[in-house]
Image: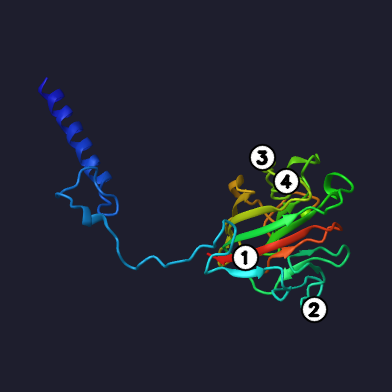
Amino acid sequence: MKTIYSLLFIIIGLSFTNLVFSQGNYPNTPPAVSPMPMKPEMTEIWEPEVPVVTPGKNLGDAPSDATILFNGENLDQWASKKDPSRPAPWKIVDKTHMEVVPGSGDIQTKMKFGDCQLHLEFSAPDAVESQGQGRGNSGVFFQNRYELQILDSYNNRTYRNGQAGSIYKDHAPLVNAMKGPLEWNTFDVIYRAPRFKADGSLDSPATITVLHNGVLVQNNVTINGLTLYIGLHHYPEAHGDDVISLQDHGNKTQFRNIWIRKL
Ligand code: MG
């Protein structure tokens, strides 16, 4: 009997030691009960002060620290993708928006970006023509590689991972929040670039959150690689910040009020 009690004592003792060691990371892992009486100020962090950003007047307007990529005036922040030394070949309409000139090619920012918050407004062509992927097709390519699809998805069925708000052929949007072709849509995007190891292999994939007209359509999804029309997506060679490009898919898609914040 005595042996059993001794054994029990040892087991309890070992469990207690285990408990103490499991909390051995303190102070990084605080114990459930504070070893000293806490005061409110002991958990207040004051420095450095959080920087002030003046928000836009209306929802969707650029905040004070944003880079304006397009405000209707000119295409100074953009270049031709075919030949980046040449100006963007799309047209400005009424000093309010730009329109794809079908066949002229994609356009791209002059600046390069990685992690960012992007606001962009787009409208499908006024005249509803064709169907499926042929109607109001365009797209936003983050780091010139990963496409957030733009399409006239208003009463226009296509494959679900190819409609507006999809990460093209990767993730379907959670819902279809598309407005009619005579109305403007907004995209608000939080994009986190992929990370690569020193040997060039993928460390962590890109992730993206997208609100379409204020409605969540991509909830921090993992981008599975380079956007491809044919074939399974996979990560390309290691790369750093790169341009954002807008697609000419042969449709007169319109854009306005594009701004970005580097994160
Ligand atoms: Mg597209």
Mark 2 near ligand 1 (CB under 8 Å)? Answer: no
Q: Which mark is on residue 259?
A: 1
Three-letter amino acid code at the position of disc 3: Val
Name the residue beneath numbered marker 3. 175
Q: Residue furthest top?
A: 1
Q: Quadrant of residue 242?
A: bottom right
Q: Is residue 241 left or right of residue 144?
A: left
Ligand 1 quadrant?
A: bottom right
Q: Residue furthest bottom?
A: 85
Per the image, label 3 sits on a secondary structure element best described as loop
Q: Nearer the N terminus, badge 4 or badge 2?
A: 2
Three-letter amino acid code at the position of disc 1: Trp
The percent position of residue 70, horizontal first and vertical second, equals 68, 68
Frontmost residue, 224 versus 36: 36
The structure residue drawn at horizontal position 87% and vertical position 44%, both measured from the top left corner, is 131
Q: CA distance from mark 4 to mark 2?
A: 33 Å
Which quadrant, please, contains the N terminus?
top left
Q: Nearer the N terminus, badge 1 or badge 4?
A: 4
